Amino acid sequence: MKGISLILDNKLVFNKEFYNRKEIRQTNKYIGRLDKRLYKMLVFTIASVGFASNKVYANSAEGLRRTDVVGNEILTILQRVGFWVAVIGCIVEILISVFKKGGGTKEIMAIIFKWLLIFSSFYIVPALFNFIKDSFV
């Protein structure tokens, strides 16, 4: 039985039967004589025990699912931007190699493979991480 109740419009309602019990009156007299510091510590302890005894069940799966969705969106954006950076970077480097250095077929192929490796890393690295994650689940 609780001594104080809260009604819908947030007004306190006192249970008179609860406060008129002999044990409660004696406890109130004893608490009234306590030192203020001790009284505050007692109130804090009782409130802490009351809050700690409430069980809270939080579901972190929803938050983690949202994190995965946002992470996948960021990864998709980086992959699309990386595609165009790799294409433009590869073409610019080929042009520089041919016109400034007079590069031949071997140098152009090395440039193409370098940029293919850079671009493929945007897909290979997440795939490897997912493979490792799935291996240990």
Image: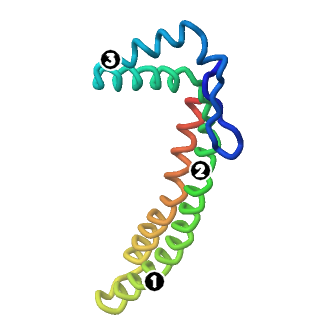
What distance separates the C-alpha of mark 3 from that of mark 1? Answer: 84 Å
Q: Estimate the x, y position of residue 57 in percent, counting from the top left.
A: 62, 30
Q: Which mark is residue 68?
A: 2
User: Regarding mark 1 in the picture, which secondary structure is present there?
Assistant: helix
Give the camera-side residue of 104 and 97: 97
What distance separates the C-alpha of mark 2 from that of mark 3? Answer: 55 Å
The vertical placement of 55 against 6, above or below, is: above
Q: Which mark is residue 91?
A: 1
Report which residue position mark 3 lands on: 34
Give the camera-side residue of 50 and 2: 2
Q: Is residue 107 left or right of residue 61?
A: left
Decide which of tag 3 and tag 1 comes sooner along the chain. 3
Q: Estimate the x, y position of residue 4 in percent, counting from the top left.
A: 61, 28
Q: How many dots with numbers?
A: 3
Q: Residues within 10 Å of mark 2 (few under 14, many from 20)?
A: few
User: Given contact means CB atoms under 8 Å apart, are the residues at marks 1 and 2 in contact?
Assistant: no
Give, as a three-letter code, the residue at label 2: Asp
